[in-house]
Amino acid sequence: DWVPRFIKRHPRLKVVIGRRIDSVRMDGTTKAGIVWEFKILEKNTYNMDESGFSIGTMESTRIVVDSTFRTKYQAYPGRQEWVSIVECICGDGTALAPFGIFKGQNVLENWI
């Protein structure tokens, strides 16, 4: 049987049991249909993205290694702090001010 071999070659795929749904209901579930049904305005539609940055880590630097080495690693301490920056843009073209998420219970003066 080719299906198990195909699944084995593609480990990010899996076999699941499909649940039944009326085809009319399935065909009617579209983004445009949901926006129309719930009367969602562009000014109430947002897209958000998050980017993480490590604080206190060194950037890539030049190092001298044997020319036969294929990978060049440089050790750095594994206990750095992370900050997440979140951006949010509205469907009407406006944007919220970006904000940062820091680990901790208090905001430190140098974070601002």
Image: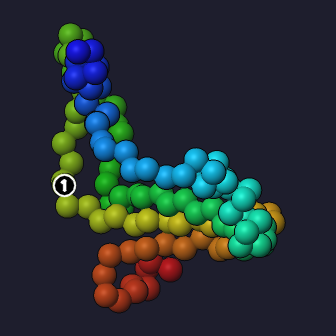
Q: Residue at x 63, y 62 (%)?
A: 47
Left or right relative to 38: residue 76: left
Q: Is residue 51 above or below residue 101?
A: above
Write the residue at 77% across / 65% down: 36
Q: Residue at x 26, y 61 (%)?
A: 80
**Quarter residue 4 falls in:** top left
49 with respect to 33 (left or right): left
Q: Tag 1, which secondary structure?
A: loop
Residue 83: image quadrant is: bottom left
> Horizontal and vertical percent for residue 98?
60, 70
Left or right: 110 as drawn, with respect to 104: right
Mark 1 residue crowding within 10 angstroms, few (<14) / some (14–19) / many (20+): few
Vertical order, 73 against 20 (above or below): above
Q: Residue 28, position in %: x, y?
A: 67, 54
Q: Residue furthest top?
A: 68
Q: Nearer the viewer, residue 107 or 37?
A: 37
Which quadrant does the N terminus fall into? top left
**In the rendered image, which quarter is residue 110 located in?**
bottom left
Name the residue tied to disc 1.
78
Can residue 31 be seen in this snapshot?
yes
- In the image, what residue occupies the spot 73% across and 64% down? 35
In-front residue for pair 63/97 = 97
What type is the residue that disc 1 sits on? Gly
Whole-percent x, y for residue 14 in the image: 28, 36
- Colour scheme of the rendered structure: rainbow
Q: Nearer the viewer, residue 3 or 86?
A: 3
How many numbered marks have been drawn onto this rendered protein structure?
Answer: 1
Position above or below: 34 against 9? below
